[in-house]
Image: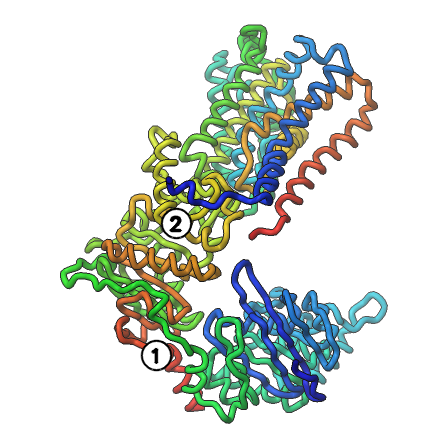
Amino acid sequence: MSEVEAVPAPGKGGAVARLSGRLKGYGIVWVTIALFILLTITTDPFLTEANLRNILDQQATLLIAASLATVAMIAGGFDISVSAVYVAVPLLALQVENATESVLLAVLVGVLAGLLIGVGNGLVVAVLKVNSFIGTLATSFMIFGAGYLISDRSILRPETDTFRKIARTRWFSLTTATWIALAVVVVTWLVLSRTRFGRHVYATGGNPEAARLAGVRVTGVTIAVFAFTGAAAGLAGVVSASRSVSAMPSDDFSFLFGVISAIVVGGTSIAGGEGGVWRTVFGAFFIAFMINGFNLHQVDPIWQRVIQGAVILAAVGIDAWARRRPTG
Amino acid sequence: MPTIALDDHVLLEGVTKQFGSTRAVDSVDLAVKRGEVHALIGENGAGKSTLGKVIAGVHEPDAGSLHISGEQVRLRSPRQALERRVTMVAQELSLVPALSVIENVFLGIESSRGPMVDNADLRERFRQLVAGSGIVVDANRRVDSLSVADQQKVEILRALARDAELIVMDEPTARLTAEEASTLLKIMRDLSESGRTVIFVSHFLEQVLEIADRITTMRDGRIVRTSEAESETAGSLVEAMIGRSLEANFPPKVAPSASADTVLEVSGISRSGVFHEVSLKVRAGEVVALAGLVGSGRTEVVRAVFGADPIDTGEVSMDGSPVELRTPRSAIASGMGMIPESRSDQGLMLRRPVRENASLPRLGLFTRLGFVNRRSEDHKVESATGEVDLRAASLEMLVESLSGGNQQKALFSRWMIDRPRLLIADEPTRGVDVGAKRAIYELLAGLAADGMAVLLVSSEIEEVLGLAHRILVMRGGRLVGELDGTDATEADVLEVAFGAEIKESAGV
């Protein structure tokens, strides 16, 4: 008899709790699949190659930024500045492209600029100990402002034809935007779930003091997750500029709302310490299918907003409810 | 069944309060007379604070009944207790730091004229309160600028402003200087003289003997006896608090070999206002315990040794070479491991699996090119959790779903993977059941027998006596005595730990 077998088998209560835990844990998967099936049955155009390809392409920029923002969220950091980086960085990238006609350099400068902004956010949060929500809200305004300065308040367009190819080239019938998003998602998922850094991210968000006492460089982890989120938001901005073949300064926070919605609907906790990149992917597609379904069913856009808000509220409400159960 | 006497202010019958598998208060019958100072004493963990909190409505009892002023009541919250004119001054004060004294005292019961606060009337009420109680505090000072002693006075004024007839004071003198304590004791005496009832939860025997009318001694959640203070002495109370043999619960001590190397050497570390000039050594195979009252600086010292908190001066060496005390990370690299004081706040990621919690500090061992090798991680964690006898249906279970004892074992299992040279264990058995306690004792003794140096902090004196080869006693941030673990008695440790208080209050 091995020692493992000597462990008392969990009782009925344990089995029920585990089953409900499992259903709850993967709820977003089931509802996304259910929605997919529902739309397949109720509409003709939903399950067509063109429609699905289109949804993938439209979700690409959001997924790039949201994957890394998920990592920051799990580490306990709420990065508001993804919108500002998403708006301002492509302006810088296009200025570089206009000046040098080098698309590669433009992309590198864009990602690097996002990374540096992220390091700045990380320092504000980890070293100055400013609440991340407030700290990155403040830096958002600075970055938005920088966007106006960089672009001289005008719409920028690429000089080269290559720039638009960043996002719009087709490989195996999918756009490069989709492929870039896929690569970012897969790499982020691997890093988060398989590496030591990923473990330190969960530990930092789950209990920073305990992580520190276990030898985790909590400050370093925090700066790193903000840096990566900044770089990803910068890349997302460049891909978006390539898709639309232009970039324009604004104070528009709406990209952030999409990112946060995908993260929380997916089930990553805004309290930090738990969640996953795959969750955000499902969260993003759940919302995308929902909006697609609204359009295919010709739901009034005003009601679309109301329903979308209710869905997010439900997701966060379930999370809060799940956390309230007593600990033993 | 006790009958309700006319002058019983509070009467408890068969009151039981359970936390997890621990019975903090076990079938307690107690009568507190109106207008008396009634002391509740006992060792740490005897249940005295819990009992006080049951009376003040902080904890709802699991069984038994509570009568206040002759009427049976169920108190589900401190607010309901206050409706019965019962309140508590807790160890953790509950004032609003950024408000003034007067604002705190009348918070929620302000005088008003229409929607506006009537400040003139508040000042008059405050003046009357001060005149009636003899408690003097500056009404306009912000509470966060006051000393702990003055903040306690504000708490008492607040209770009086709400017409409290019974005040439970939970270790009110623990953080006060001797002089401040004697002022507070006088205030408590005055409260009782003015007809109010005071329940004084404390482990300061001399203070209890000085002001209490009656004393109830608790041990392991039960009442040993309630007696007139005049009939007790410090010695008789200590005897009542201890009252049982120790040997049976603890594994035999294996003395470290005479030639064992010094693993940890701490030389004169200080942090201003917290601990002062602390020096100690722990040899391989030796269990050294830091004993002392709550607040004597034990935890602060071991946290500083581990690099978790800064020090002003002094030096720490491991195996003869100095350790740069910057972060726990560098302490771990130098060969230390720590079981922190609070497993939920400082130890565990409650919503992560056992496996991840166990492997965290040693993840580097299973990591190649940044990637964690799950197979070797699983293997090592399995054997580590086996060594500490952690019972979980699966290592993928969330830590929060484990019992307290198994959670504590999960913390121990961390240091079973690639054992450190020194293990610091701060309150390693707090809040675990008897079975798990015994297992942790055997584990600590076994690790020492295998040559690990162990630095133990514990509030349970019997644990200190049962495990340690040497006992270092702290008082007021200083090491004040060293006792041999083989022949010291509980009374010896208490004498050194209480020393100053006995002398000082005798001098007042």
Q: Which residue is mark 1?
A: B496
Amino acid type indicated by mark 2:
Asp
Q: Say above or below: B410 vs B190.
A: above
| Mark seen at residue B211 | none
Q: Which residue is mark 2?
A: B389
Amino acid type indicated by mark 1:
Val
Question: Mark 2 Cα within 10 Å, few/some/many (few <14, many 20+)?
Answer: some
Chain letter of the residue beneath label 1 in the structure image: B
Residue A42: percent from the left, percent from the top? 78, 16
- At horizontal 19% and vertical 55% (from top left) the residue drawn is B320
Q: Which of disc 2 and disc 1 is earlier in sequence?
A: 2
Chain letter of the residue beneath label 2 in the structure image: B
Q: Say above or below: B225 vs A21.
A: below
Q: Is residue B168 left or right of residue B467?
A: right
Q: Nearer the viewer, residue B322 or B210?
A: B210
Q: Quadrant of residue A37?
A: top right
Q: Establish whether labels 1 and 2 are both on one chain.
A: yes
Q: Nearer the viewer, residue A205 or B62?
A: B62
Q: Is residue B258 left or right of residue A172?
A: left
Q: Nearer the viewer, residue B372 or A184?
A: B372
Q: Is residue A84 visible?
A: no
Residue B289: percent from the left, percent from the top? 32, 66
Q: What secondary structure is found at the residue carrying circle 2?
A: loop
Q: Quadrant of residue B130?
A: bottom right
Alpha-carbon distance for marks 1 and 2?
A: 36 Å
Q: How is the image coloured?
A: rainbow
Q: Is residue A89 left or right of residue B291?
A: right
- At horizontal 42% and vertical 82% (from top left) the residue drawn is B238
Residue B136: percent from the left, percent from the top? 61, 83
Q: Say above or below: A13 vs B14.
A: above
- At horizontal 43% and vertical 57% (from top left) the residue drawn is B436
